[in-house]
Image: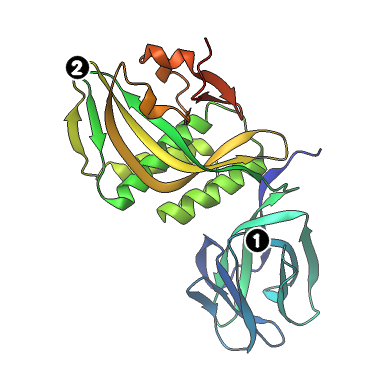
Amino acid sequence: MMASSIKTVSWGGNDGEIFEKRLIKKISLHTSTCVNQIGINKDKHGSGGVDRGEIILAPDEHINKVNIRSSVGIDFAEFTTNKARTISGGAPEGSNHILENMRVIAIGGRSSLRLDKLDIMYIDKYEESTIEERNVEFILSYTLPFKNIYMFEKTREQVAEIYRKMTKIMLERQYSASIEGEYYEKVIASTKLEVKDVKLETVKNELEKDLITGSPTVRIVPKDHVGIEVISGTIMKGADGNFWVSPIDSLSYSAIQINDAGSILNHYDLTGTLHTQIPSLALHKTTKNNYIYYSEQNNE
């Protein structure tokens, strides 16, 4: 198995105005004897040309092949998805560049009256993760008695908090570039932040910055209780055998009694240590999909 990696390539010239790289949900082309315009999501870059159509990516679809010809600008462009859908146009001029066996993460570049340049961020030697388990519950974090628990009520802030803590958890493990790229796309699509670097540490730092202006409600965890944050989501398995969590954008808070293990059975513990605070959980602790899991079955 060859290791995947995150790369960025640039083709074309330096005329025109810069447009920043964006995740691709929809892509369109207008062309003539060159690529006049590219549409990325709701934005158009360049002008004129004949409409060559658009591709709106399905949830399980991504661009996995790119064929570009360029000189002082982009002369020809062709984008193909893993569902074998293609959009293309332009003229057979300039130097030819082909990317395949990969996954496009984001596209940016430069444009004026035409498309002058393309910057493409992609996962080289991409290997897709598969779904291991759906609709499961995860303990994202816990807070000890007499400590403050910070509860975000606004949906946008909850989503940023989920991914901030999830990213910290992911930093404790080693993941392939394929998984990091997939997770990055999930974070950006959910939070709408503009994080230009896919490194997990950078993602975490940007999420922390975003939450500085947040307005959480602060509660003190009562005596003999533990405050917990719970999320739902899907367990994914990378081609390298590593597991990771794709969260659903919803966060719930509760305070449970230290002697009440029943309410959090059948949960994965992403902290890995809640059983040290609720001793009876130790009787239910097992390992499942490489995470701590509290089974209904008693291990005595």
The three-letter code of the residue at mark 2 reads Lys
Asked if residue 221 is positioned above or below residue 135 in the image, the reply reads: above
In depth, the one of 113 and 225 nearer the eye is: 225
Crowding at label 1, few (<14), some or many (≥20) Cα neighbours within 10 Å? many
Question: Label 1, on which residue?
Answer: 62
Q: Residue at x 55, y 66 (%)?
A: 25
CB contact under 8 Å: marks 1 and 2: no
Asked if residue 86 is positioned above or below residue 151 in the image, the reply reads: below
- The x and y percentages for residue 220 are 18, 26
Q: Residue at x 26, y 50 (%)?
A: 154
- The x and y percentages for residue 103 are 68, 55
Identify the image quadrant of residue 288: top right
Mark 1 and mark 2: span between their CA atoms? 50 Å
The three-letter code of the residue at mark 1 reads His
Q: Which mark is residue 223?
A: 2
Q: Is residue 293 left or right of residue 118?
A: left
- The x and y percentages for residue 256 are 28, 25
